[in-house]
Image (cartoon, rainbow, N blue to C red):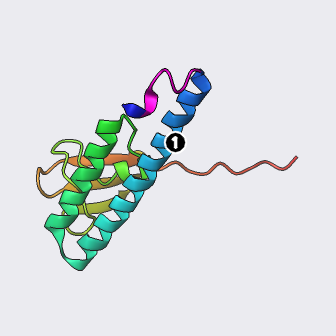
Amino acid sequence: MGLLRKSRYKSRRGRKHILSLRKRLVLEHIDKIMKRALEEATRGNIKLAEKMGKFARKLAKWTGVKMPRRWRYFFCRKCKSFIMPGITARIRVRQNRYPHVVTYCEKCKNYKRIPVRKNKKTSRG
C-alpha cells in the first residue's frame, strides 16, 4: 500500500483519485484477460481459458473491484468455473412464465436463469 501514504496525500481527494485510478486500471486488465480467455476457448485451448478466467476473478477479489456484469455471466454460481458457451455450457432462450436465458453448466449440472427485459416503447406526446 505504498500509494496511500498519509504524508504524501494529505487531502482525501488525492487518495480517492488514486483509488479510482487503480479501479479503472484493474477493470481494463480484467477486460483484456477475459477477452483473451474467450479467444483461447474458441481456439480449443480450454484449460488455459479456464486458468485465465480464474485469474481475472481472483484479481477482482484481491483488489475489491466488482466483476463487470458483462463478464459475471461467464462464471457458474455453484462451482465457480469459467463457462464457455457451447463448450462447457448450454445456452437456451426460453419464454416460460417470463422471457429468460438459461445457462446450463456441464460440470456441475447447475442451471442459471437470466431474465430478459423488454424495452419499453417511448410514448409520443
Please report the residue visible at 58 percent of the width from the left and 22 percent of the height from the top: 12
- Residue drawn at the location 24% of the way across and 62% of the way down: 90
Residue 67 sits in which quadrant? top left
Q: Nearer the viewer, residue 62 or 71?
A: 62
Depth order, front residue of 2/19: 2
For the view shown, which residue lies furthest in the bottom direction?
43
Residue indicated by mark 1: 21
72 vs 13, left or right, is left
Compared with 39, 123 (above or below) is: above
Against 41, residue 5 (above or below) is above
Question: Magenta region: which residues?
Answer: 3-10
Q: Where's the N terminus, which quadrant? A: top left
Q: Nearer the viewer, residue 41 or 61?
A: 61
Which of 116/85 is in front? 85
Q: Please name the amino acid that badge 1 sits on.
A: Leu
Question: Would you say residue 95 is visible in this rendering?
Answer: no
Expressed as whole percent of the image width and height from the top left, the position of residue 102 reads: 31, 53
Using the image, determine if residue 34 lies above or below residue 11: below
Q: Specify the principal SS of the magenta part.
A: loop
Residue 21 lies in the magenta stretch: no
Residue 114 drawn at (x, y percent): 38, 47
Left or right of 101? Residue 78 is left
Residue furthest right in the image: 125
Looking at the image, which residue is at 50% across and 21% down? Answer: 7
The residue tagged with tag 1: helix, strand or loop?
helix
